[in-house]
């Protein structure tokens, strides 16, 4: 039998003005198990709290009901007071007789009656309360960053800066990501490599940062503060510790016809390669799909020329298992494939290119050493047409439903740079809307038209037809002139939509992190928790969460790092004790609860039970990880047998409230 | 058919592939075929039966046998509708698929003995199928009855004759039946006024004697302990003391199996009070199909059922308030 | 027995802690009135509302039950209200199918900023239930007042 | 005004096209082979029908200039189907004039499996004078 104390607050006249608090205290004092019931001016004040503390000691209370303002206001205050008097804080319930009673009613009799009923409901609930103890779990003080683009790099640097170890897993042979392929960056036009490579070097040199390049995440288990991750280090057939990055092997390799992915296949590399000069780690990698030695066993040139003896044809994939307290996803994006849009003739003409290919054509380290030349004949293009929104803002059948966000700005950059370097070139940009919300963005776009004379045309290109003379006939509408244009262009550049990297979906499954229909990771809250995944301990950095430009990516990367640091700085995590728990004797292991859990908090264990006849039996039962569960209760309703219940909001507690209200 | 099945069962039993066989044998009367577990060739020889009275869904018996010994190899004969329940039980980890050898048996619909009796045929000892007729064996000699007149209601509105899981097939595999008409009665009820519906269901549910046969036979009712039997649940009730409790039990039971019910119709078959309980389950199935897209529980063992999944643009609950017929 | 007296219905409102309960608080802070016969039960999320609770309320004498949660897409637990939406839709449809007045139940999405909507919703719902009259089809006679 | 919305509804119903999905990119007009022949262009059809401004379209020769090649339908990023809107306006114009050129009994012999039914109907209405 509980011993319950009821404390009715006047809140000055806020409550006492419309609720007869004395009558409430008196009526509730007659409820079963209530041993004391008093009213007071301000319960939340120091002396009000002391009143509660004294009553807990004097009456040996096992439960407390405070009739006052909203629990969202002072539930914690009263819980702390109870704890100070030696009562479990979760034995306190609040009846909200201010916001949900005195403030909305004028009639005193009516409001008083309602306050009594709300008090009764709280008493009925507290009758069934049980002391709850918040669990604790240790935090492993190391973070994992998945993806080594600018997002991952910035997050890793910021975490390391706070003194925590960070591992970066990057699937390519080098970190750097998409930004390494860019020429200049908008709106300031600094060179991408100049601002990125120092950060890459910093990562390599920072003692707290460990880079797993050419590696992928194979499996993830555990929970916030305590993840265990299997990392597959793919065989690169070069001993990273020995290779000096001299590059001799990449010059001598006889296999010269490997499409160079760094230049998007616009030139070739060798079978053993270093993606680019500033690669980090600067270590050669052998492409097993093309290496003659690995395929036929005959060649071995690279091994012969390597003075460091770093080549190892017998290398195999290696799995390392490491523990982390937090995981940051920074898997980035890719441009979509545009060959499905027949009307733009991407597959038909070499001179229809994507914007990322255009970046390579204008980059000094690119296939043309930075000279803008047509891929088909190597001639300088005099008329260039840029097409916006290729695959963005479409119906799901036609492409991506979202705006890819970065295309308007980089196209303005491309147009501007082209006009600056080659003033004899006519540049047309076909747009639906020009979207430039960002600091100095609209000014930048205006400069493209006002200072550089780029022709912006409101309208869309309907068709690109390659002609016999090598030009491309661009048929488009000009919506403002209300006419149809035909432009004979030398080069057509498509601003392809961007999409999350393909590796994100399987990774999300491993992390039990949720994704939207476009495979972007979802945030814990779209406004208030934008860099956290709903799964505790998983954080989001960069374009894996949605299309982003570089400044935005870097700020999000820093924000994610701050969240990680906040987590790793703790020695132990205190869990919310109002979490789900499963009655193993009732659970039949059907897995429905795990299907609705947004946090992956429910796992199934094979547990041995002693049956009434003393025989032992192994049964599959649900097990809730209290460190991961957030206490939403979705599982409790899915469970038909009622094996799954929620501490603090149990089936019986809520039904007791219902009963008290309806009586 | 029965002989082929018997032969195959004995083969698999004697070559050690399986240790138990789940099928049917006569119960109290020779027309109430009951699920049965056989462990020897002799038992099969003398008792195993498969005929047009074998309507009972045996999938749940696999679960029961595996509960006794999860590693014992079991042979089970499943009719098409039983395979859906079997899949659903597998999906919910109630059956270890690897330890079961499934022989799918084709089915053309089962006979309803009540209908045969109602046609004045007495002393029934057996049944045979013959095209669009059933030949009913009786102590007074053979009688014939048109298939349409003796077919069980649920088989007349059969949703699928397709075997969704099997290791081998005896007989013919069929297809999913389009336009089975199984929702016709639900639609008819929906078209009634609220008063008429209330009247209808009061009339039906007030007959409930809480024998729990529906719950015991249901392949989706697999709880260790039912909420209605658990004093700790706060809603336990042994017998319905009030009309509310009659409603409560059946609403909650239907809700608990919603999305998981394969529409096998066993609940209505076993109800001694002849309450059309399947109309509750079918209402959920019809709503699910209409609101969230066609879904058949037990089609496979992978997909999440409609109540444990969602789409961002699901219908709002107000659709219920906005549709016709208050 | 109340005969010819003004019928005041008993209404149970399940409100999720993060949006609707806060919305109810806000309507209090703004002094927006709604009838006193609406009593709120705080639950962590609309997905915590078990059909058993709804039936229980009717059994014990409630005349109307309303469930309020975050707007779809805004759930504090990301997905809770999506499950609640399906469950309540199907349950309400079933009650309707059994001939129980469909307007005794309702779901509304009320955000923490929508104090006015909360009060308006409650006023509207109370009026609706008052018009429907006492719950007789899903009550437990033993609990009749 | 009422008549205006009535006409719009009628055209939307006939065409089954979702004009409200249009994002005004002009790709339909950019792709239209009949563009120069037309007074009102595909994107204008979509926009004007959405506004309910159908009268001008009904009177315009443009409705007969559309080749029904469906390039705009094929390429519209938003699935608006401008050609179907134009066809619906054309039908409306023909109906208003009481000049239905369609002889139903001629259809079966003209059908073959390759020809989209809708295309055939359009051709009949346009050319069977």
Image (spheres, coloured by chain):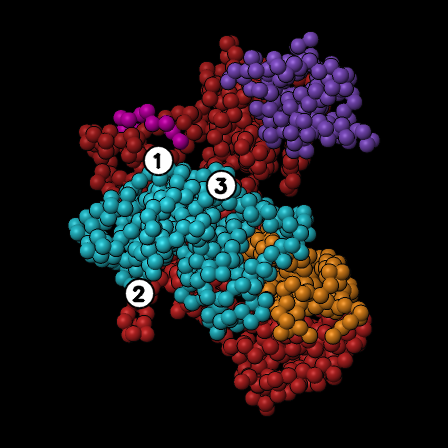
Circle 2 — which element? strand
Circle 1 — which element? loop
* Residue at the (45%, 42%) spot, across then down: B148
Q: Look at the picture and state if D129 lies above or below A136.
A: above
Of all chains in the rendering, the one displayed in red is A
Please provide percent x and percent y for residue D109.
56, 12
* Residue at the (65%, 29%) spot, across then down: D17
| Label ID, residue B180 | 3
Of all chains in the rendering, the one displayed in orange is C
The residue that label 2 is drawn on is A618
Badge 3 and badge 1 in a common chain: no
* Residue at the (56%, 71%) spot, across then down: B241
Please provide percent x and percent y for residue C143.
64, 73
Q: CA distance from mark 3 to mark 2?
A: 42 Å
Please give the range of residues in magenta: A251-261
The nearer-to-camera label among 2 and 1 is 2
Left or right: A173 as drawn, with respect to D104: left
Asked if the residues shown at circle 3 and circle 1 are in contact, with their CB atoms under 8 angstroms apart, the answer is no
The residue that label 1 is drawn on is A274
Nearer the N terminus, badge 2 or badge 1?
1
* Quadrant of the drawing holding the N terminus of chain B: top left
Residue A115 painted magenta:
no
Q: Look at the picture and state if A354 lies above or below B192.
A: above
Q: Look at the image and give the colour of chain D.
A: purple
Of all chains in the rendering, the one displayed in cyan is B
Circle 3 — which element? loop
How dense is the environment of label 2, judged by Cα within 10 Å: few (below 14), some, or many (20 and up)? few
Badge 3 and badge 2 in a common chain: no
Residue C88 location, quadrant: bottom right
Residue positioned most to the bottom:
A58
| Label ID, residue D63 | none
């Amino acid at each position: 039998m509980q011993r319950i104390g009821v404390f009715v607050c006047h809140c000055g006249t806020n409550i006492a003005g419309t609720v007869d608090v004395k009558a409430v205290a008196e009526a509730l004092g007659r409820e079963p198990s209530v041993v004391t019931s008093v009213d007071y001016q301000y319960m939340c004040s120091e002396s009000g709290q002391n009143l509660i503390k004294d009553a807990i000691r004097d009456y040996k209370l096992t439960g407390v009901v405070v009739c006052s303002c909203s629990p969202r206001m002072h539930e914690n205050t009263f819980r702390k007071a109870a704890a100070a008097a030696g009562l479990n804080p979760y034995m306190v319930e609040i009846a909200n007789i201010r916001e949900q009673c005195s403030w909305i009613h004028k009639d005193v009799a009516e409001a008083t009656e309602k306050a009594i009923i709300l008090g009764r409901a709280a008493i009925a609930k507290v009758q069934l309360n049980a002391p709850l103890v918040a669990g604790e779990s240790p935090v492993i003080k190391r973070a994992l960053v998945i993806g080594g683009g600018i997002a991952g790099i910035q997050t890793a640097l910021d975490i390391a800066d706070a003194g925590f170890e960070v591992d970066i897993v990057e699937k390519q042979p080098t970190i750097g990501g998409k930004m390494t392929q860019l020429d200049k960056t908008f709106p300031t036009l600094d060179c991408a490599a100049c601002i990125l490579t120092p950060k890459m070097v910093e990562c390599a040199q920072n003692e707290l940062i460990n880079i797993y390049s050419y590696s992928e995440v194979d499996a993830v288990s555990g929970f916030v503060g305590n993840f265990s991750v299997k990392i597959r280090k793919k065989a690169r057939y070069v001993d990273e510790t020995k290779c000096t990055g001299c590059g001799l092997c990449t010059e001598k390799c006889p296999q010269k016809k490997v499409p160079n992915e760094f230049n998007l296949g616009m030139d070739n590399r060798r079978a053993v390669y270093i993606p680019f000069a500033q690669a980090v780690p600067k270590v050669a990698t052998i492409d097993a799909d093309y290496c003659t030695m690995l395929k036929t066993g005959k060649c071995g040139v690279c091994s012969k020329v390597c003075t460091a003896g770093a080549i190892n044809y017998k290398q195999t994939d290696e799995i390392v298992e490491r523990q982390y307290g937090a995981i940051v996803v920074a898997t980035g994006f890719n441009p979509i494939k545009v060959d499905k849009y027949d009307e733009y003739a991407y597959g038909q003409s070499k001179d229809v290119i994507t914007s990322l290919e255009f970046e390579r054509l204008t980059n000094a380290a690119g296939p043309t050493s930075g000279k803008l030349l047509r891929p088909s004949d190597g001639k300088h293009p005099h008329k260039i047409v840029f097409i916006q929104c290729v695959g963005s803002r479409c119906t799901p059948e036609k492409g991506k439903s979202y705006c890819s966000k970065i295309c308007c700005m980089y196209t303005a950059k491309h147009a501007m740079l082209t006009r600056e370097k080659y003033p004899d070139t006519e540049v047309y940009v076909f747009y639906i809307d020009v979207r430039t919300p960002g600091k100095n963005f609209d000014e930048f776009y205006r400069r493209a038209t006002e200072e550089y004379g780029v022709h912006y045309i409101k309208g869309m290109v309907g068709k690109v037809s390659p002609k016999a003379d090598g030009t491309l006939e661009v048929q488009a509408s000009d919506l403002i002139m209300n006419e149809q244009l035909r432009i004979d262009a030398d080069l057509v550049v498509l601003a392809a939509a961007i999409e999350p990297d393909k590796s994100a979906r399987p990774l999300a499954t491993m992390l039990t992190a949720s994704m939207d229909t476009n495979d972007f990771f979802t945030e814990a809250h779209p406004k208030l928790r934008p860099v956290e995944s709903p799964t505790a301990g998983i954080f989001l950095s960069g374009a894996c969460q949605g299309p982003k430009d570089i400044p935005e990516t870097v700020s999000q990367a820093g924000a994610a790092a701050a969240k990680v640091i906040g987590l790793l700085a703790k020695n132990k995590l205190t869990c919310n004790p109002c979490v789900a728990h499963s009655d193993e004797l009732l659970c039949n292991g059907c897995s429905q609860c795990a299907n609705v859990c947004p946090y992956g908090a429910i796992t199934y264990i094979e547990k041995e039970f002693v049956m009434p006849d003393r025989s032992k039996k192994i049964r599959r039962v649900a097990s809730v990880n209290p460190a991961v569960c957030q206490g939403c209760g979705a599982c409790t309703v899915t469970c038909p047998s009622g094996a799954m219940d929620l501490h603090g909001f149990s089936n019986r507690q809520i039904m007791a409230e219902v009963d008290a209200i309806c009586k | 058919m029965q002989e082929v099945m018997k032969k195959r069962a004995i083969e698999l039993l004697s070559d050690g592939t399986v240790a138990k066989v789940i099928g049917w044998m006569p119960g109290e009367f020779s027309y109430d075929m009951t699920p049965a577990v056989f462990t020897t060739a002799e038992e099969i020889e003398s008792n195993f039966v498969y005929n047009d009275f074998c309507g009972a869904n045996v999938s749940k018996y696999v679960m029961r046998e595996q509960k006794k010994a999860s590693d014992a190899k079991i042979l089970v004969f499943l009719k098409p509708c039983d395979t859906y329940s079997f899949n659903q039980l597998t999906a919910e980890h109630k059956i270890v698929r690897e330890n079961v050898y499934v022989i799918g048996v084709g089915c053309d619909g089962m006979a309803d003995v009540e209908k045969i009796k109602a046609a004045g045929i007495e002393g029934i000892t057996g049944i045979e199928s013959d095209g669009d007729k059933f030949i009913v064996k009786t102590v007074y000699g053979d009688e014939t009855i048109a298939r349409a007149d003796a077919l069980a209601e649920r088989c007349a509105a059969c949703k699928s004759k397709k075997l969704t899981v099997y290791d081998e097939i005896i007989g013919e595999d069929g297809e999913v039946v389009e336009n089975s008409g199984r929702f016709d009665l639900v639609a008819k009820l929906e078209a009634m006024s609220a008063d008429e519906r209330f009247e209808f269901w009061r009339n039906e549910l007030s007959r409930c004697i809480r024998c729990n046969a529906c719950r015991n036979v249901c392949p989706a009712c697999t709880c260790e302990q039912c909420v209605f039997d658990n004093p700790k649940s706060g809603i336990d009730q042994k017998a319905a003391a009030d009309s509310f409790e009659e409603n409560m039990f059946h609403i909650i039971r239907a809700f608990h199996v919603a999305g998981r019910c394969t529409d096998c119709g066993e609940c209505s078959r076993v109800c001694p009070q002849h309450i059309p309980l399947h109309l509750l389950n079918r209402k959920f199935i019809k709503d699910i199909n209409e609101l969230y897209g066609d879904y058949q529980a037990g089609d496979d063992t992978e997909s999440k059922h409609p109540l444990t999944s969602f789409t961002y643009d699901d219908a709002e609950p107000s659709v219920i308030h906005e549709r016709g017929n208050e | 027995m109340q005969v010819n007296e003004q019928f005041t219905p008993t209404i149970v409102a399940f409100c999720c802690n993060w949006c609707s309960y806060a919305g109810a608080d806000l309507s209090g802070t703004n002094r927006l009135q709604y009838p006193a016969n609406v009593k709120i039960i705080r639950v962590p999320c609309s997905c915590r509302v078990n059909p058993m609770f709804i039936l229980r309320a009717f059994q014990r004498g409630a005349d109307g039950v309303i469930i309020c949660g975050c707007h779809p897409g805004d759930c504090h637990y990301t997905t809770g209200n999506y499950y609640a939406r399906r469950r309540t839709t199907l349950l309400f449809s079933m009650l309707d199918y059994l001939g129980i007045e469909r307007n005794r139940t309702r779901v509304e999405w009320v955000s923490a900023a929508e104090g006015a909507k909360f009060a308006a919703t409650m006023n509207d719902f109370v009026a609706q239930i008052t018009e429907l009259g006492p719950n007789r089809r899903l009550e437990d006679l033993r609990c009749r007042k | 005004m009422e008549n205006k919305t009535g006409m719009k509804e009628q055209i939307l119903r006939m065409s089954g096209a979702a004009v409200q999905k249009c994002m005004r990119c002009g790709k339909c007009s950019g792709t239209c082979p009949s563009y120069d022949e037309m007074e009102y262009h595909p994107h204008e059809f979509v926009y004007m029908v959405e506004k309910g401004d159908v009268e001008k379209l009904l009177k315009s020769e443009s409705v007969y200039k559309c080749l029904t090649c469906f390039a705009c339908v094929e390429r519209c990023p938003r699935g608006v189907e401008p050609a179907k809107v134009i066809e619906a306006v054309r039908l409306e114009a023909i109906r208003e004039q009481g000049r239905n050129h369609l002889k139903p009994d001629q259809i079966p012999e003209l059908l073959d499996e390759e020809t989209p039914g809708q295309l055939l109907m359009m051709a009949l209405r346009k050319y069977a004078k």
